Amino acid sequence: MNNKETAIFICQLLSNLYQQINLFGDQRLKIIYILAGINDGLEIVINQDRN
């Protein structure tokens, strides 16, 4: 599973739990940022190694 697939999987899980999901990416660093929940209280960073 690559980092894009990981981000999709996490967003699918969060979609039933949180009202809002914001997804950002940095192609240069190959990082995906996910901010979710009320006031973006949950922050997830997925790097190229999917960590």
Image: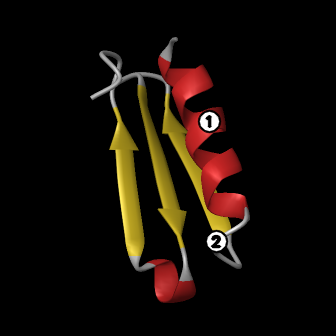
Q: Mark 1 falls on what kind of element? A: helix
Of the numbered discs 1 and 2, the one sitting upstream in the chain is: 1
x 35%, y 23%: residue: 50
Look at mark 1 in the image and give the residue it sits on.
9
Kindly give the residue lying farthest to the top in the view shown. Answer: 1
Viewer-closest of 33 and 37: 37
Q: Compared with residue 8, is residue 18 higher up or lower down, i.e. above or below?
A: below
Residue 43: name its quadrant. bottom left
Residue visible at 52% across and 38% down in the picture: 25
Amino acid marked by disc 2: Leu
Give coordinates of residue 40: x percent, y percent: 48, 78
Element assignment for label 2: loop
Nearer to the camera, 40 or 29: 40
Q: For the view shown, which residue lies furthest in the bottom direction?
A: 39
Look at label 1 and name its amino acid. Answer: Phe
Rendering coords of residue 1 (x, y %): 52, 11
Query: Which residue was labeled with disc 2?
Result: 17
